[in-house]
Amino acid sequence: MLSPNFSPFPEITTERLFLRRMTTQDAVEMFHLRSSENVMKYIDRPNAKSITDAEIYIGRIEESINSDSGIMWGITLKENRDKLIGNIGFWRLIKEHYRAEVGYMLHPDFWKKGMMKEALLQVIDFGFNNINLHSIEAHIKPDNIGSARLLESTGFSKEAHFKENFFFEGTFRDTVIYSKLNIL
């Protein structure tokens, strides 16, 4: 069984990005992300209604890091590490199966610039080489073409399409699952 340890918190640097631990000081930017109809279009979770909602979300992330049950990085530009532009991480670790579910979001100003691919490749590497995952999965909505392309471009394969398996805001919704194996 996996025994991850996220202390000290592992920061990640890429060519253009710095992935770091989020704090309540990121609540304003997180509120803007999680209250944006554009950003939340493909995320079946309630939109944030207040800064407090964003603080609660960051608090849940902090709890999962402290309990080693998940890890989420705040995405910033290398030259401006204080301003959050997104997040990425393994929000669900399935320790007994050496598997994790990756999730991510990015401010629309940075879409289609290769930044999420840059972050995802490093997070995949961390998952396989530091956490010792055997596989990583991603759950997306079937019409989320951008996310499907991102996953495919980083080596994920479509594993399943579940019909009406998720109930949100009064309707049943489909889920597509992608996965990537740690094949040496």
Image (cartoon, helix red, strand yellow):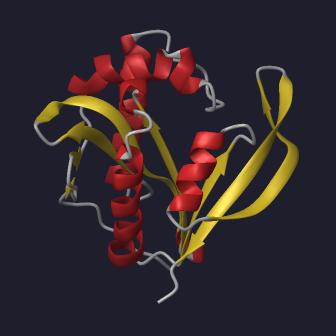
Indicate whether 143 appears above or below 10.
above
Q: Nearer the viewer, residue 119 or 2?
A: 119
Q: Nearer the viewer, residue 65 or 16?
A: 16
In this rendering, does residue 99 appear at all?
A: yes
Residue 21 position in % (x across, y down): 24, 44
Q: Residue furthest bottom?
A: 184
Total marks shown come to: 0
Indicate whether 69 appears above or below 88.
below
Relative to residue 1, is residue 132 drawn left or right?
A: left
Residue pictured at 61% horizontal, 32% vertical: 43
Q: Residue furthest top?
A: 50
Q: Residue furthest front?
A: 113
Residue 172 position in % (x across, y down): 86, 32
Relative to residue 162, is residue 114 drawn left or right?
A: left
In this rendering, does residue 54 appear at all?
A: no
Residue pictured at 59% horizontal, 51% vertical: 149
Residue 15: quarter of image: bottom left
Relative to residue 184, is residue 101 drawn left or right?
A: right
Residue 174 position in % (x across, y down): 82, 41
Q: Nearer the viewer, residue 114 or 168?
A: 114
Residue pictured at 28% horizontal, 61% vertical: 6
Indicate whether 173 appears above or below 138.
above
Residue pictured at 57% horizontal, 75% vertical: 96
